[in-house]
Image (cartoon, helix red, strand yellow):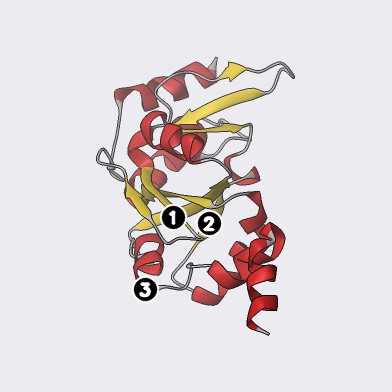
């Protein structure tokens, strides 16, 4: 029986069942400790080099932040359900945290400027969006909102030394002015 279990563990598609560290205390704490004053999200990526790049350069997304970033709360069951639906996208979970104060301020500013079809995440970029090959707008959320990442198979955690969920760049207000047209 033990040799059968070792054989199953070697098969990549089943190994996460046996080696998933999501529910370990240190992993849960890193993902969920952000409190009531933060909006927290997770994003999965396959390669550690991509995870490192996101920590250093910020999180790129096309059109909508919510296509690949999932909101998380302190609800462990909700996190586990989201994890089980996305863990096959990669071993690395990027943790993104934005202060409610920052999110609320820029949501209010978007409303005040009467700019529909955008969310505060579209504003929190250091550089204006660029168009990709499909003419979709590509945004890059500032790296200060990236808390770090965790390998859900090993439990290894890498923290972003520049993490600042309260980060507020003068470029954010400029982005609203650019969107006004």
Identify the element where label 3 is drawn: helix
The residue beneath circle 1 is 40
The residue beneath circle 2 is 71
Which corner quadrant holds the C terminus? top right
| 103 vs 156: above or below | above
> Seen from this angle, which residue lies furthest left?
161
Which corner quadrant holds the N terminus? bottom right
Residue found at x 55% / y 52%: 91
Left or right: residue 159 compared with residue 2? left
| Residue 115 x %, y % | 56, 30
Q: Nearer the viewer, residue 96 or 159?
A: 159
The residue beneath circle 3 is 25
| 21 vs 97: above or below | below
Identify the element where label 2 is drawn: strand
Left or right: residue 164 compared with residue 143? left
The count of marks equals 3
| 38 vs 139: above or below | below
Identify the element where label 1 is drawn: strand
| Residue 106 x %, y % | 41, 38
Q: Nearer the viewer, residue 15 or 137?
A: 15
Mark 3 Cα-neighbour bin, 10 Å: few <14, some 14–19, many ≥20: few
């Amino acid at each position: 029986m033990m040799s059968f279990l070792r054989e199953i563990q070697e098969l990549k598609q089943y190994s996460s069942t046996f080696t998933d560290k999501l529910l370990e205390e240190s992993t849960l704490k890193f993902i969920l400790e952000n409190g009531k004053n933060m909006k927290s999200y997770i994003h999965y990526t396959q390669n550690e080099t991509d995870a490192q790049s996101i920590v250093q350069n910020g999180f790129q997304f096309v059109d909508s932040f919510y296509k690949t970033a999932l909101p998380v709360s302190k609800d462990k069951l909700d996190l586990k359900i989201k994890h089980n639906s996305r863990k096959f996208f990669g071993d690395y979970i990027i943790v993104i945290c934005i202060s409610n104060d920052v999110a609320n301020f820029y949501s209010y500013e978007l409303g005040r400027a009467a700019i529909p079809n955008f969310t505060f995440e579209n504003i929190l970029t250091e550089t204006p969006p660029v168009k990709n090959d499909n003419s979709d707008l590509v945004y890059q959320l500032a790296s200060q909102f990236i808390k770090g990442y965790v390998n859900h198979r090993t439990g290894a955690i890498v923290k972003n030394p520049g993490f600042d969920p309260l980060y507020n760049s003068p470029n954010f207000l400029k982005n609203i002015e650019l969107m006004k047209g």
